[in-house]
Image (cartoon, rainbow, N blue to C red):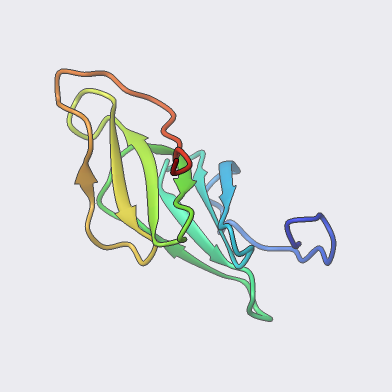
């Protein structure tokens, strides 16, 4: 489905639970969501005839609340992989996981802020 709700196409979540906290890329070509059973971040490429899923973070536990950057390169998310819920970023291709908040600061639900 495009960002206007038209041209709906089914896609599978491969028996890993429901998709939640989904975010569309600004260009409407990708969607990133968290799977409820595994809390892995998954990217769905929507511009292909056969939908494909790509797990962005196979080694990250409890990744949730993805938010794709305005340039569609980064994905912000929260995770408790360090024992405390913190904000992280990962590239849209699944490389370069980086913490953005200190270990002693609990943070949830990141969002990109428009440039001024």
Q: Quadrant of the N terminus?
A: bottom right
Q: Which of 67 and 79 is in front in this view?
A: 67
> On the image, which quarter does residue 20 sit in?
top right
Q: Is residue 24 above or below residue 51?
A: above
Residue shown at the point (15%, 18%) measured from the top left = 104
**Is residue 57 visible to the viewer in this orientation of the structure?**
no
Q: Is residue 12 left or right of residue 16?
A: right
Residue shown at the point (48%, 54%) measured from the top left = 70
* Furthest residue in direction left, as rendered: 103
Q: Which of 2 and 8 is in front in this view?
A: 2
Q: Exactly how many numbered labels are in the figure? A: 0
Q: Quadrant of the C terminus?
A: top left
Q: Nearer the viewer, residue 64 or 90?
A: 90
Q: Which of 113 and 42 is in front in this view?
A: 113
- Residue 72 in picture, x, y percent from top left: 46, 61
- Residue 108 in picture, x, y percent from top left: 38, 25
């Amino acid at each position: 489905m495009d960002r206007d709700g038209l041209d709906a196409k089914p896609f599978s979540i491969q028996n890993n639970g429901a998709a939640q906290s989904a975010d569309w890329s600004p260009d409407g070509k990708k969607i990133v969501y968290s799977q409820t059973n595994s809390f892995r971040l998954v990217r769905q490429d929507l511009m292909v005839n056969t939908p494909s899923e790509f797990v962005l973070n196979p080694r990250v536990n409890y990744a949730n609340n993805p938010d794709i950057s305005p340039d569609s390169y980064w994905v912000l998310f929260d995770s408790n992989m360090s024992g405390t819920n913190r904000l992280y970023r990962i590239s849209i291709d699944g490389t370069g996981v980086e913490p953005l908040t200190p270990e002693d600061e609990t943070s949830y639900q990141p969002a990109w802020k428009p440039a001024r």
